[in-house]
Image (cartoon, coloured by chain):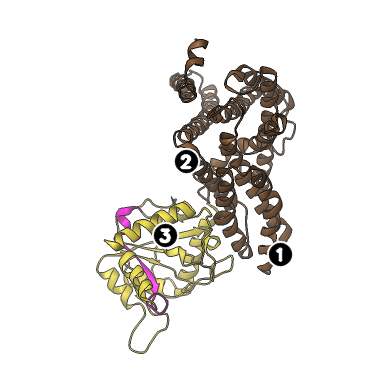
Amino acid sequence: MRAKLMGLFLLGLVRLLTGSQARWYGCPPKAEQRIYFANHQSHADLILIWAALPQVLRTVTRPIAARDYWTRTPFRQWITSKVFNAIYVARERTADQDPLDPLVEALESGDSIILFPEGTRGHAEEPQSFKAGLYNLALRFPQVVLVPAWIANVQRVMPKGEVVPVPVLCSVTFGAPLKLEEGEERRAFLDRARNAVMALRDV
Amino acid sequence: MNQYLKSMTATEQVGAMFVFVFGCLFIASVALLLLSLREHADRGADEARRSNLARGNTLLSSSWVMVIVFWVGWLSGDVGATVLFGLVSFFALREFMALSPTRRGDHRSLVLAFFVILPMQYTLVGMQHYDLFTVFIPVYVFLAIPVVSALANDPQRFLERNAKLQWGIMVCIYGMSHVPALLLLEFPNYRDRGAFLVIFLALVVQTCMVVQYLVTRRLRRAPAAPAISSSFNWLSWGIAVGVASVLGALLAGITPFKPGQAFVMALIACVAGSLGHLVMKAIKRDRGIPDWGQQGDGVTGANGLLDRVDALCFAAPVFFHSVRWYFNL
């Protein structure tokens, strides 16, 4: 109940501050298993892409949150696990666990996921080069549709290190789905995915 | 008829005026709908007519939005109206800022503009501190914003960024806040009729814009500043301002003015509003966009609120101060 109210409150807040407009260019919103991958510049990215999805898809689409940051305080943990139903991922690879394991688990149970393949928030104009996670998941789940997305303007709402958000209109542009080609190299695929995200900047 | 209208209370008069204005808009909408149903044999002419109708529709829908906002503002009383116009300001400024690139160093200034300056300005209006509210932004905020920006330690394009912010605040907050101020302005022998003054202003300014659009289509004169606006020319501008000012004189009955005064006041408001619209067009061209909205498809998701209220934002302060100065209020 409290999580639901918090969700509604955050949704209202995001709409008031950013308009949270979804622009479906390459594909319609559809209830199939998908991996949305987008550029990452602010914590608000997660909320924005979540708010841009239609209500029905929001419940089956799980964002990914860095475990060390988002479980540090009880409030952060509550908001990510109860409101966003996030999947926690460790940033560093440890000996006994692959950081992709929780994602694999979620995909196996049929959920869609939201992935930021840069791994961390960037503050340059262009996204940093993508990490291998996206490639590994695409290899392992060939039936899951890969949808690139560009989140515009959100770094202006809440830059790294600021606490008060300002109202600036933002949008999430969803592009045409990508497919891992037969025998495609890891680097080539990741660069292609990054270009697909960046190409959405100007549509 | 006149006797009957005079015997009504102020509230009834304002209500009757809204009924009348809504009726006019309704007739115009029905007429446009019927026009759009008619089909033409010639394919090319049909296309051209359709795009014309679409532009007419935009103008009409902005008139609807404006009148509904005023109506709700009037219904909700003084405080409600102030809050309502504060919200319009907020959304207009959000749109303006979305399309003016800022840097990270501007973050604190933006927070200041949205969450401190905007509420303070409207509070001053609501409490009718007219002396302070007219100087608050041009004097105090003018200094406060660049100080906050300077402390952010980012010299790159400093003047340009601050000018943008200051402009957005002037147009979207300062200009717009004069509309509720007009609502609260107290004339002797004209109590509780501030809504008439606001409607008078909005009606003449909007009439001026509509007439200008219609006349420009008929006359097809060379534009005065083609790089800024493909339609603006002095002749149709003059005709539009003339027509709207005559309308203002005819509406003198609902204002505290005599017909001559009403004519001049309408003239001032129309000149300020239509030229202000041209200035906003220049800003849009500078940013390389045709409209603040682009039919909800723009990268920013702006929905073009600013296109609808920019003329009013420029007309309101000029009108307000002319009235206050002339009548020594």
Q: Is residue A24 above or below residue A163?
A: above
Report, in whole angstroms, how far the alpha carbon at label 1 lies from the one at label 2: 41 Å
- Judged by depth in the image, the label closer to the viewer, 2 or 3, is 2
* Mark 1 Cα-neighbour bin, 10 Å: few <14, some 14–19, many ≥20: few
Q: Say the numbered circle drawn on residue B156.
A: 1
Secondary structure category for the residue under label 2: helix
Q: In brown, which chain?
A: B
Can you say which quadrant of the picture contains the N terminus of chain A? bottom left
> If you read the primary sequence from the N terminus, does the residue marked by circle 1 or circle 2 appear first?
2
Residue at the far bottom in the pictured view:
A95
Give yes or no for contact between labels 1 and 3 (Cβ–Cβ under 8 Å): no
Answer yes or no: is residue B190 visible. yes
The x, y position of residue A12, in whole percent, is 40, 53
Name which residue lies at 37% across and 80% down. Answer: A99
Q: In the rendered image of this protein, which colour is used for chain A?
A: yellow
Closer to the camera: disc 1 or disc 2?
2
**Nearer to me, A169 or B152:** B152
Q: What residue would you read off at disc 3?
A: A49
What residue type is disc 3 on?
Ile
Give the residue at x 72% y 33%: B325
Element at badge 1? loop
Q: Contact, CB < 8 Å: mark 2 with mark 3?
A: no
Residue stretch rendered in magenta on the structure: A54-72
How far apart are labels 1 and 3 at the CA level? Answer: 31 Å
Return the residue found at the far front.
B188
In the rendered structure, find residue B80 and report the number of the disc placed on it.
2
Residue B26: which quarter of the image?
top left
**Whole-percent x and y of residue A168?**
53, 55
* Residue type marked 2: Gly
Q: Is residue A55 magenta?
A: yes
Q: Secondary structure at mark 3?
A: helix
